[in-house]
Amino acid sequence: MGIEWKTGTVKSIIAVRAKLQEIVLEMADGSSCRAYHDLSAFPPLMPGHQVLANTTAVTLGLGTGGAHFVLAPLAPELSTGGALPPGHIMKLRYTALQRAVLAVEEAESGAQEKLAGNNTLERMPVLIGELHSMLPAAVSWLRYQACGERPLRIAYVMTDGAALPIAISQHVERLNELRWLAGTITYGHAYGGDHEAVNKYTALLAAKHVLQADIAIVTMGPGIVGTGTAYGYTGIETGELVNAVAALEGIPIFMSRVSFGDRRERHRGLSHHSITALKTAAVARAVVPLPILSSPAQSGIVDSQTATSRLMDKHEIVWREAPALDRMETAMQAYGVSITSMGRGLRDDPPFFASVCAAADEALGKLFAADR
């Protein structure tokens, strides 16, 4: 285990979000690097302030998470004090940065009453995805397709499989700006959502009964751990989420990771991440929509992968015609910010977005069928 600590001086402020500051730190060796400062723990920084920062990710040359993270300001005047806000559930437990949050399970939250006796999702469609980039793509397509039908209440549930502070997500910030989300929930050791939850079960129930969502989307935050081994990746949690949604009598709808832009063979077509999560981790039955791609060769590869892995023995595979590229482009343009996955946009890797759209269409179909 290794952590590298260094002191630095705030050189400039890049951006300030509700619960996060993005800054430039100048280190003692003269180098400068982007850094993040958690405003849920400390007051804002100003140029000239000295800080202690975790510089491990940059030293390791990591892409995702390749920035410094401020542990604490060294200026005495920036130390916090006074009474703590309500809440007794600790996140980042038994670490120097453990913090108390007011969770939906606590009486003081006002949400406990709404959860009392509500132990099922009442057949709410839940979109389950591995990558954080699936979130804005799914929300954009849901809104585009539902236009004229009825208003949609979409809740985002963020797991602790990647980034822990939700403030790291620029997509959540943008979705909130657009008012496209009914609210956000962070569970496990993820924190900073509109509501906090102890685990995935209460987070899902809060999406339904506290946020009164029509559809919930569950993904990890920005970043994902992968090792190239069969089970050594955080996205395997999607299989566990299928089990949780099914146990709570919701409809688990799996957003498969499909790509023909990724050079890695294990992610070509239907990613081994999706196959492994569905084949091994998911015990309950999920709805797995897959796009019929414009390229017969590409569709053939995905079809062959589902057959070889025998996913249809455990899950409901639903084939949907992939939306035309220009329609997906129109839907994503309304978001106003470029959506990329692994550095690739819609035109670089249409199958990725088509797979997300197929799942979103299935969720809408289930929702509107229930309305009737």
Image: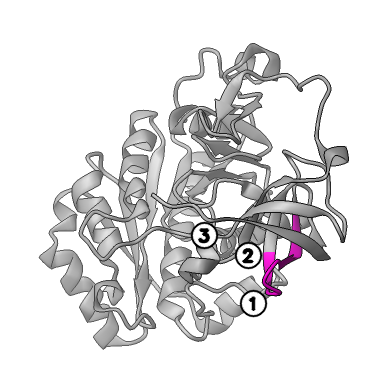
Residue at 51% across, 13% down: 117
Q: Residues within 10 Å of mark 2 (few under 14, many from 20)?
A: some
Q: Can residue 14 be seen in the rendering of this structure?
A: no
Where residue 208 sits, quadrant-wise, is: top right
Residue at 43% across, 59% down: 224
Q: Can residue 10 be seen in the rendering of this structure?
A: yes
Question: x, y (%) of residue 103?
Answer: 61, 24
Q: Residues within 10 Å of mark 1 (few under 14, many from 20)?
A: few
Question: x, y (%) of residue 64?
Answer: 51, 66
Which residue does the numbered mark 3 point to in the structure image?
Answer: 56
Q: Amino acid at mark 1?
A: Thr
Question: x, y (%) of residue 12?
Answer: 83, 67
Which residue does the numbered mark 2 point to in the structure image?
Answer: 144
Q: Which numbered disc covers residue 330?
A: 1
Q: From the viewer's perspective, is residue 77 above or below residue 269?
A: above
The residues tagged by marks 3 and 2 sit, at their Cα atoms, a distance apart of 41 Å
Q: Is residue 112 magenta?
A: no
